[in-house]
Amino acid sequence: MPTFDGNEGTFITLSEGAGMTSAYREANPDAIKGLFFGKNKLLDLLNQTGCVGIRIYFAIDDETKEAGLVLVGAKENTNDITSGYIIDHGISCPPVCGADNDLNS
């Protein structure tokens, strides 16, 4: 049975990330570019007992019908921590994107 150890994922270069986000924007010109989640909420989620990382689910907001993300902590045994913190309603870009850079312009 697979397990998580907290080292999942891969660091990529800015060039790789820029290529990926550019391809997404080209395929979805009217979609939001990204979502911002605050450090304190992420730390609350990560600091739950047994949490070794975050699983991110793609979602549709019931009220706005916009695409979004739902973040939940995950345990070593790959199960979600559904009795604790679950994060939604990140700040969307646009309108709050910060300065143009290779990932968002």
Image (cartoon, rainbow, N blue to C red):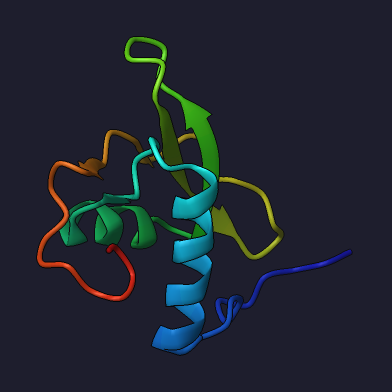
Where residue 62 appears, x then y in whole percent? 41, 12
Q: Which quadrant is the N terminus positioned in?
A: bottom right
Horizontal and vertical percent position of residue 81: 53, 44
Q: Residue at x 69, y 57 (%)?
A: 78
Q: Hey, which residue is sitting farthest right in the picture?
A: 1
Residue 64 picture location, percent across and down? 32, 15
In depth, the one of 89 and 2 nearer the eye is: 89
Say which quarter of the image contains residue 97.
bottom left
Q: Give the total number of marks visible in the rendering.
A: 0
> Which residue lies at the image location 50% right of the left edge and 74% below the top edge?
19
Residue at the image point whose x is 63% and y is 77% from the top: 5
> In the displayed structure, would residue 13 be above or below residue 40?
below
* In this picture, residue 5 sits left or right of residue 2: left
Is 94 positioned to the left or the right of 81 in the image?
A: left
Q: Quadrant of residue 67?
A: top left
- Residue 32, above or below 22: above
In percent of the image, x 53 and y 61: which residue is there? 23
Residue 52 seen in the figure = no
Q: Nearer the viewer, residue 4 or 99?
A: 99
Relative to 11, does residue 79 appear above or below in the rendering? above
Foreground pick, 89 / 65 = 65
Please give left or right for residue 12 compared with residue 75 in the image.
left
Q: Is there any visible trace of residue 56 in the rendered image?
A: yes
Q: Position of residue 95 (x, y in %)?
A: 14, 41
Q: Residue furthest top?
A: 63
- Location of residue 40 with respect to 92 vertically, above or below: below
Name the image quarter holding the C terminus: bottom left
